[in-house]
Image (spheres, rainbow, N blue to C red):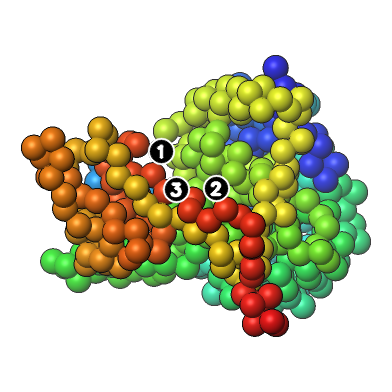
Amino acid sequence: MADLSINFAGIKSPNPFWLASAPPTNMGSMIERAFDAGWGGAVWKTLGEPIVNVSSRLAAIDHGAMRMIGLNNIELITDRPLEVNLKEMAACKKKYPKNAVIASLMVESKRDAWHEIVKRTQDTGCDGFELNFGCPHGMSERGMGAAMGQVPEYTCMVTEWVKEVSDIPVIVKLTPNVTNILPPGKAAQNGGADAVSLINTINSIIGVDIDTFVPYPNVNGKAAHGGYCGPAVKPIALNMIAELARDTEFNIPISGIGGVSNWRDAVEFLLLGAGSVQVCTAVMHYGHRIVEDMIDGLNNYLDEKGYASVNDIVGKSVERVTDWGNLDLNYDVKAHVHEEHCIRCNLCYIACEDGAHQSFEFVESNGKRFPRVIEEECVGCNLCYLVCPSPGAITMERRDDGSHPQTWKERTAA
């Protein structure tokens, strides 16, 4: 079996699967049960000045039979006393010395406040810090969280404050609520961060009760925007991680967060540059034991691909991500219908006729009516393939011979 152990910015872990800072890491007993289940590490629910949370706190989007494809929360940082959290953290690390215990921190933007909590927390024996510069609700209204992470200068400044007194690795958790992830990522690096983690949750209102007119979640007839997470945010997370990983000036490790629900999701994050992956919503939905399948799946994948270590696949897809102007304009694919697999639902025809390029017609074959691609009209957009419910009924097939690749940049230069 492949070696799943990692050394992430100096933080050792038996595997790359960590619990993210969130309700599943609210107390020591929860994290200890997670470690018993097989999780490699955990980022403690954010410590700071204890706050008062509201009720209710969560709302979700379902899709068909799938529950919680997107989860919205308005929960803030820990509402438990700092002394209690620190005592439990020290006990947890002592009991599980081989697992990664990372302390998430958030305090007001004062140098002394950051120095104090860093010094007190690292006495627990924790393996690293994660600075919460990403929380988009509640704390940001108090000048913390995303309010810090959206200003690169503040990100750099507070990171420097922490590095002045920290004896252990410092991870900066970035907010996705920016137009470009590179400035805050580079600011964390310039401030001396040993690594970054992303993404935190996305500003959102999940929906509105059209009978009461109150958005979700309802807090006595009112609502506030919250943080969006779950499977629905995975594409956004992958893009932001790839943007950092492929930037030539960015060279510190990345911990990937955002919609990781199974081993395949984790592999995608690793391939795009993440050195560890953090999970929250899937654990809230299905419980700790999902890590068993994640470990088995990753092991089997690495074995099948011939890799001895999980570290061998980190970043392997980064060089394949490029700007649009570098894509081959002469690469040509066409859709093709395989009648033996076609169930004649006609979704491909409808989708193409009403939503794409009118590239389908109907033909009679063996006494039945089948959709067929008009190749001269097909632009290879993939829509028919994506909507088709029958595996193997539609494939995208290459028509050019690959002998004359040309990018938009090359074409405009010529």
Q: Are marks 2 and 1 in contact (CB under 8 Å)?
A: no
Q: Amino acid at mark 2?
A: Ala
- Label 3 residue SS: strand
Which one is nearer the viewer's eye here, 336 or 230? 336
Mark nearer the N terminus (3 vs 1): 1
Direction from residue 350 to residue 172 in the image, left or right: right
> Mark 2 or 3 closer to N-term?
2
Judge the density around disc 3: few (<14), some (14-19), many (≥20) Cα neighbours within 10 Å.
Answer: few
Left or right, residue 234 beside residue 11: left
The residue carrying mark 1 is: 285
Residue 38 visible: no
- Residue 198: where, in percent of width, then height? 64, 56
**Residue drawn at the location 13% of the way across and 35% of the way down:** 366
- Image location of residue 200, percent across then percent down: 58, 58
| Furthest residue in direction bottom, as rendered | 413
Q: Is disc 1 surrounded by few (<14), some (14 to 19) or many (20+) residues within 10 Å?
A: few
Task: Determine whether 95 is above or below 397 in the image.
Answer: above
Q: Residue at x 60, y 32 (%)?
A: 31
Instruction: Say what secondary structure mark 2 lies in.
Output: loop
Left or right for 119, reference 334: right
Residue farthest top in this picture: 1
Q: Which residue is mark 2?
A: 22
Distance from the alpha carbon under mark 3 to that under mark 1: 39 Å
Placement of the N terminus among the 4 image quadrants: top right
Q: Please determine whether, in this image, residue 139 is positioned above or below residue 391.
A: below
- The answer to whether residue 203 is left or right of residue 309 is left
Q: Name the residue beneath numbered marker 3.
A: 397
The percent coordinates of residue 291 (x first, y second) are 55, 28
